Amino acid sequence: MIDSPQREDLRSSSDSDEELPVFDFLQPRPSTDVASQKAQKKPEVNNFNGKAAAFSSSVLGKGGSADVMMISSDSDDDVAYVPLAQRLKLRQDSAVLTERNQKGSSESEHLLTLHKERRSTPEEADDLPLRHLSASETGDASPTRTKATKRSAEEIRASREEAVRRRQARERQQQDREALKQEQERQKAERRALVEAAKALRPEECIRHMVVAVDPALLQLEGGGTLLASVQALGCSCAIEKQPLPRSVTWARQAPSAQQNDAARAPEPHVVMQMTVEDFVTLIHNYIQEERHSGPACSPTLTSWVREQQRRHPDKRLSLAVVELESYFRARKSQSQKRLRAAVAGEEAGGGKEKKKRRTGHAEKLPEVSRVEVEEAVVHLQLHTGVSVRFLSTWKEFSDHITMTTKAVAEAPFKRAREQTGFSFYLESEWAGGQRVDKAGKGLLQAWKRQIQQFNRVSSDVAGAILAAYPSPQLLKKAYSQCRTENEKLSLLSDLLIRRGEGVTSTTRRVGPELSKRLFLLMHSRDPEQNLDASL
């Protein structure tokens, strides 16, 4: 065995003769395995011989990761000696710094990308990138960067104001569009209402918009049921309402859009009042007594009573209807005949008188008036008040009268509008309506014929005879130009034949010189005041 001092000498001599191996570590690769990262940070190197290197490689291989730290044993004499522990520490520090720099750069790129994608307001456009750049740089904020930050704040403020103005402009435009839409809807509703109102005035539609108001007292009479049935069969609405005038019928027109709304009714001024025979005869008798005695009226007459009703209801047009007045005249006639026969035969028996009074008790209560006196009172009433009286024999006729009046009241606005043409003559008739002429010239022949018929005493046969010889005014003018003398022009049409009828009963005659002369004056006269009927 060798002593310990000798061992130490041998070890020192061997250390000086042999050089230690230099371990060169490669830069570690980034790994996702936590175990491999720990192995890279704390490598276990116990020996510097080949066994230690093999042991460390086998241990890293068991970790399952592909990252392996290689150790190189190559050495050069010229390279300065660096202790192994210091070299390992430097390698680890450089690897940590590189990994941090890579993470920082990737985070900054990710933030910039997100900022560009989510850039919606001016504050976001200038906030995050500046913060990141200022945090990444180590130097202090320069005056240039401070000025850029101030400009960004001003731009942010300006952009906010611009955004507010744009939003307000959009809101104003939206309000304008809504107001315009509402105005268009209102105008459309008004046009629709006008169309419906005009349609409601047509004869085939107007009757459905009428409301006939009947006084309940009128329905309690004998013909009340017949009247109600006739009005309902007409197709209009019927209302049983208390009327200002007793036993009267009034009318109202409903708006097309509100069939069930009473406030939408437009009352008509027409009123038909049914007068009983007793009241009518009494008023006629008072009138006759006043006219005969020529004194102050002690009782109301027919004219004074109607004037009082007109004073109370100035907006109404009153007309009277008297039912079964003929029954009164027949009863008076039969009574007078019976009295005459009784006077001639001398019948004065008490039983006969009682029987006669029982039969004619109702007629005996009424005053006696004649037909002439009734007509006189009615004429006086029409002259002073303008109220007409309609005499009806039965209640069926009264119902028909109400039905016809309802139709007349319903069609009155349409007829008035049709008559408002601005001309003094009626234009809707077949003769005055004119002749339609199309683009192909169809209708010109009839227009020429009607022009000839404008003359007095010119019938359709006469115009047809002239039309057969000269189908147009130009041909007639050409024929006049071919005449040599004035007399020949005047008598050009006088010999034309006019045929009337057919077969054996047909007759012929000539146009004559008078009509020929008038047509010549019509075609050649330059005087607008020329009288075509005057002789030359």
Image (spheres, rainbow, N blue to C red):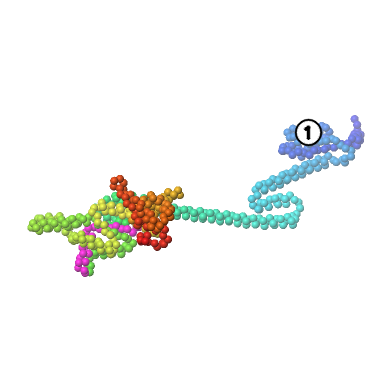
Q: Tag 1's secondary structure?
A: helix
Which percent across, then down, holds residue 146? 72, 56
Instruction: Please give the range of residues in magenta.
Output: 266-295
The quarter of the picture where the N terminus appears is: top right
In this rendered view, identify the residue nearer to me: 236 or 376: 376
Badge count:
1
In the rendered image, which residue does mark 1 sit on? 57
Which percent across, then down, holds residue 347? 8, 57
Residue drawn 19% across the image and 60% down it? 370
In this rendered view, identify the residue nearer to me: 296 or 24: 296
Left or right of 126 on screen, residue 223: left
Q: Is residue 356 visible?
A: yes
Which percent across, then down, holds residue 21? 85, 36
Decide: is 37 above or below 480: above
In this rendered view, identify the residue nearer to me: 494 or 19: 494
Residue drawn 91% across the image and 37% down it? 16
Residue drawn 25% across the image and 62% down it? 379
